Image (cartoon, coloured by chain):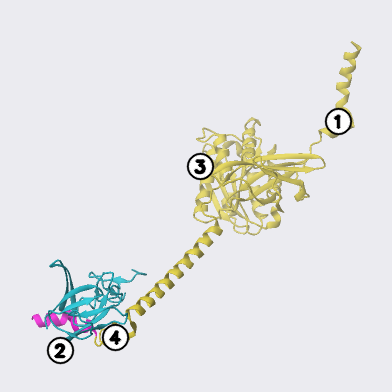
Chain colours: A cyan, B yellow
């Protein structure tokens, strides 16, 4: 804990002075669903505000796939809409299989690297 | 026949020749009084050197001494100093006999000898006095030269208690050990027992050998003054005991000579040599080793042997200091490492010096609001919650 950092139960990296995880207390507003052969394999909850997606331990949504960068994308969820854009690492982002950073809606297909997710949102 | 006669005459005449007489004259003799191995491998040995008349010889130098431990080579770096020059205090414990046979002149002589002895104490020396009985009956203890209770000494009368010399001495040793534990006297302070007795004793629990061993183990030499009362037969016990403990024995045919013999004893105590050295090649194994001190002067040599305990020290002092310094350094390094790792972690999380003004929690630089204040329920005071429920 002294050298590796403090982690919450969900695996989010925390500052040692925090007693609760700021990611876990934020309300869930959507999910990224990963399916394989029409079967749901992983469900990644998305929270209100900024969500950093990637493989890194400091990401809000940690996706451990080879093609996903350490800091891959930033997904911002607000009541007026959900936006996805590159986090600066040059990772591949596709929305409905087209390469563009833009607003996404419930049911869109999001591709990060070579991994495809279905986006579900309660807004 | 002539040859036989000649040889008989020669045998009778030879001892009278001057050359033969010279050969019979003995040189100085050395006696190890006490070995202080508290700081093993550093050792301090107290050695008394007497000339043939029994007078202390203080004219020897380092070159006259040879010190050996077990069968090792002689110790090379010796430090030699006469005890008197070190100005270290001595604690004397006097044992006086007041059995029926001591009534009259012997008892009076003992009292005056004790008072004379007390008057000549050096500054810093202390004196305790006990009576020989079934145990050591204490008269006074740790008195300096100026605080000897003369009335208590003069008030000694003949006792009906059975004199048990060995038991009394052992109880004296126990008291010294207890006082060392209570730090009335230092562990390394020199303690000397002085016994004035006629050597008669009854049904001791301890034997001569046991008493000698106990005294020797605690590093207390016994200087015994044997006073002839009815016969000299019982006095040999005192001589044997004094030799066993590293002390000396002084025979006194008349009570008036006690004071003179005590003076000799004190001279021996104060005029001893203190030999300090470091033992090499012998490990501290909590077992006994033999020390040999030899003096050589004018082609005459004298040796004395005595055993000492090679104390096992689990941690030498220097090792303790090194370990402590290492522990402090390690702790400081650990604290620094924690501080730097936290700085690195905060940098990675994007946390600067920013804090929430309400909850005072650290905030990421890119947070627009404090999630703790927004999403966590505010803590309620107990008093307020009680009021609300009422």
Check disc 2 and report its element: helix, strand or loop: loop
Residue tagged 2: A80
Label 4 lies in what chain? Answer: B
| Front-most of residues B196 and B6 | B6
| Visible residue check, residue B342 | yes
Q: Which mark is residue B20?
A: 1
Q: Residues within 10 Å of mark 2 (few under 14, many from 20)?
A: few
Distance, label 4 to label 3, CA atoms, is 88 Å
Sequence-earlier tag: 1 or 3? 1
Label 1 lies in what chain? Answer: B
Q: In which quarter of the image is residue B32?
A: top right
Asked if labels 4 and 1 touch by Cβ distance under 8 angstroms, the answer is no
Looking at the image, the residue that sits furthest to the left is B390
Q: Residue A107 carries which label?
A: none
- B21 lies left or right of B71: right
Sequence-earlier tag: 1 or 4? 1
Kindly indicate whether the residues beneath marks 4 and 3 are on one polypeptide chain.
yes
Distance, label 1 to label 4, CA atoms, is 112 Å
Bounds of the magenta segment: B370-390
Check disc 1 and report its element: helix, strand or loop: helix
Q: Quadrant of residue A103?
A: bottom left
Distance, label 2 to label 3, CA atoms, is 102 Å
Q: Is A65 above or below relative to B60? A: below
Kindly indicate whether the residues beneath marks 2 and 3 are on one polypeptide chain.
no
- B366 lies left or right of B3: left
Kindly indicate whether the residues beneath marks 1 and 4 are on one polypeptide chain.
yes
Check disc 4 and report its element: helix, strand or loop: loop
């Amino acid at each position: 804990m002294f050298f590796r950092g403090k982690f919450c139960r969900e695996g989010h990296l925390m500052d040692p002075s925090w007693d609760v995880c700021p990611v876990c207390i934020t309300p869930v507003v959507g999910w990224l669903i990963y399916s394989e052969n029409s079967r749901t394999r992983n469900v990644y909850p998305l929270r209100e505000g900024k969500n950093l997606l990637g493989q890194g331990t400091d990401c809000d949504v940690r996706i451990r796939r080879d093609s996903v960068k350490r800091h891959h994308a930033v997904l911002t969820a607000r009541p007026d809409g959900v936006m996805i854009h590159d986090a600066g690492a040059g990772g591949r982002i596709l929305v409905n299989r087209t390469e563009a950073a833009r607003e996404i809606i419930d049911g869109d297909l999001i591709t990060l690297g070579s991994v495809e997710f279905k986006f579900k949102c309660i807004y | 026949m002539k040859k036989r006669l000649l040889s008989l005459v020669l045998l009778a005449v030879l001892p009278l020749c001057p050359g033969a007489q010279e050969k019979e004259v003995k040189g100085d003799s050395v006696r190890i009084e006490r070995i202080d191995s508290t700081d093993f491998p550093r050792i301090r040995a107290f050695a008394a050197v007497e000339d043939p008349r029994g007078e202390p010889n203080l004219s020897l130098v380092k070159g006259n001494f040879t010190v050996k431990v077990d069968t090792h080579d002689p110790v090379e770096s010796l430090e030699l100093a006469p005890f008197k020059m070190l100005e270290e205090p001595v604690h004397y414990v006097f044992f006086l006999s007041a059995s029926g046979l001591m009534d009259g002149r012997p008892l009076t002589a003992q009292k005056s000898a004790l008072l004379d002895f007390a008057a000549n104490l050096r500054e810093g020396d202390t004196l305790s006095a006990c009576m020989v009985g079934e145990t050591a009956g204490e008269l006074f203890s740790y008195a300096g030269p100026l605080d000897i209770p003369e009335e208590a000494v003069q008030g000694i009368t003949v006792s009906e208690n059975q004199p048990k010399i060995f038991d009394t001495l052992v109880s004296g040793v126990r008291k010294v050990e207890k006082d060392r534990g209570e730090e009335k006297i230092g562990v390394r302070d020199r303690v000397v027992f002085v016994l004035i007795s006629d050597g008669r004793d009854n049904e001791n629990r301890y034997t001569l050998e046991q008493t000698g061993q106990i005294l020797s183990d605690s590093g207390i030499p016994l200087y015994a003054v044997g006073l002839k009362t009815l016969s000299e037969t019982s006095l040999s016990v005192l001589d044997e005991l004094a030799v066993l403990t590293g002390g000396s024995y002084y025979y006194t045919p008349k009570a008036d000579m006690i004071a003179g013999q005590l003076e000799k004893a004190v001279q021996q105590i104060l005029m001893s040599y203190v030999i300090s050295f470091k033992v090499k090649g012998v490990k501290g194994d909590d077992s006994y080793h033999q020390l040999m001190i030899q003096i050589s002067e004018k082609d005459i040599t004298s040796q004395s042997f005595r055993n000492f305990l090679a104390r096992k020290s689990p941690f030498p002092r220097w090792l303790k200091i090194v370990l402590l310094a290492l522990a402090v350094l390690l702790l400081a390094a650990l604290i620094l490492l924690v501080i730097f790792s936290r700085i690195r972690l905060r940098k990675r999380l994007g946390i600067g010096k920013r804090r929430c003004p309400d909850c005072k929690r650290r905030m990421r630089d890119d947070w627009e609001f404090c999630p703790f204040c927004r999403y966590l329920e505010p803590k309620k005071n107990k008093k307020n919650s009680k009021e609300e429920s009422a």
